[in-house]
Every structure is written in structure tokens, then in C-alpha cells.
Amino acid sequence: MGEGEEWQVTLRTTADRYPALEAHLLHEHPWDNPELTAVPIAAAPEGYKAWLDKSVSEL
């Protein structure tokens, strides 16, 4: 427990790219144990899924 400002951020990526995103966030976050959770997209329009796949690229 500590004191300080806390933010909730929603990031979207593909399941294939999640491990890289998680590793980056854990490495860069100043806290020892930040809250980092993943929520799978159970359903979405095909157009959105295509946009997401196109938008996510290798770092």
C-alpha cells in the first residue's frame, strides 16, 4: 500500500502481442507490483477485429 496518484488505462492489442506489451509495462512501471490485467475480446464486429490486427505492429 502506498500513497500517490493512480490512473486506469485501457490498452488494446492482440493475444499474440500481449506478452510483449505486458513485459514492456512491467519493465517501465515504477511500482514493484502494478495492477495489470487482461480481458479477452469475446466478440466484436469483423471490421473492428481487422482494424485491430492492422493497427498492432511489432515494436
Image: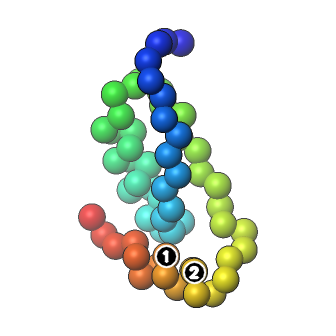
Question: Percent from the top left, x then y, of residue 11?
Answer: 49, 56
- At label 1, counting other C-alpha atoms closer than 10 Å, the crowd grade (few under 14, some 14-19, many 20 or more) is some
Give the amino acid type for the residue marked by disc 1 in the picture. Leu
Give the answer, above or below, for where 41 lies relative to 48: above
Q: Which residue is mark 1?
A: 52
Say which quarter of the image contains residue 42.
bottom right
Give the answer, above or below, for where 31 lies relative to 36: above
User: Residue at left 40%, top 76%?
Assistant: 55
Q: Which residue is mark 2?
A: 48
Depth order, front residue of 18/13: 13
User: Residue at left 48%, top 12%?
Assistant: 2
Q: Are marks 2 and 1 in contact (CB under 8 Å)?
A: yes
Question: Percent from the top left, x then y, of residue 4?
Answer: 44, 18
Give the answer, above or below, for where 57 lies relative to 31: below
Q: In the figure, is residue 1 to the left or right of 43?
A: left
Question: Percent from the top left, x then y, of residue 21?
Answer: 40, 54
Question: Percent from the top left, x then y, of residue 47?
Answer: 58, 87
Say which quarter of the image contains residue 39.
bottom right
Secondary structure beneath disc 2? helix
User: Residue at left 49%, top 82%?
Assistant: 51
Give the amino acid type for the residue marked by disc 2 in the picture. Tyr
